[in-house]
Amino acid sequence: MITVPSVIASLVIVLGLAGIVVPILPGTILIGGAIVGWAAFTGGEAAWVAAAIAVTVLLIGVLVKFAVPHRRLREVGVPTSTIVIGGILGIVGFFVIPVVGLFIGFVGGVWLAEAGRLGAS
C-alpha cells in the first residue's frame, strides 16, 4: 500500500540521488535521512532492518569514496598532511561560502599546503 511517508521518502531519495550526481545537495545524508524517516513512520522490525542495511551500505560508500582516492594520492607522493589541510579548509569553506565553498576550500587548502611544502624545500 502506498502511503504519504513512502511517497515523501521516495521523493527525498530521488533528490538525494540527484545530489550524488550533482554535488550541490548532500545526497548521502538525504538518502539516509529519508530511509530512517521512512522506517520511523512505518515501524516494525522489517523497516528497521531495511534502514540499517541501507545506512550501512551508504556508510561503506562514503568510506570507499575517501579511502580509494587517498590511497592513490599517497601512491603518487602526495603527503597525508596536504590531504588533511585540504579537507579541513574544505569543511571551513563549506560553511563560509554556501554551495561551492567545499570545493574552493579543498583546492585552496591543497594549494597552500603544497606551496608551503615545495617552497620550503
Image (cartoon, rainbow, N blue to C red):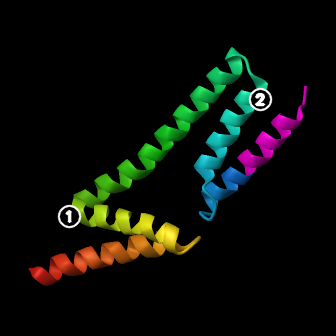
Which quadrant holds the N terminus? top right
Of 43 and 62, the residue lying toward us: 43
Judging by the rendered image, the residue that carries numbered circle 2 is 41
Q: Which residues are magenta?
A: 1-14
Q: Is residue 22 above or below residue 61?
A: below
Question: Tag 2: residue type?
Answer: Phe
Judged left or right of residue 2, residue 53 is left
Residue at horizontal 62 percent and vertical 52 percent from the top: 27
Residue at horizontal 23 percent and vertical 63 percent from the top: 81
Judging by the rendered image, the residue that carries numbered circle 1 is 77
Confirm whether the magenta stretch covers residue 8.
yes
Judged left or right of residue 81, residue 92 is right
Secondary structure of the residue carrying tag 1 is loop
Task: Single out the residue that lies furthest toward the front.
Answer: 96
Residue at horizontal 43 percent and vertical 68 percent from the top: 92
Which quadrant holds the C terminus? bottom left
Secondary structure of the residue carrying tag 2 is helix
Q: Is residue 25 above or below residue 49?
A: below
Question: Tag 1: residue type?
Answer: Gly
Task: Single out the residue that lies furthest toward the left.
Answer: 121
Task: Single out the residue that lies furthest toward the bottom.
Answer: 119
Q: In front of the other: label 2 or label 1?
A: 2
Q: Main secondary structure of the magenta part?
A: helix
* Quadrant housing residue 100: bottom right
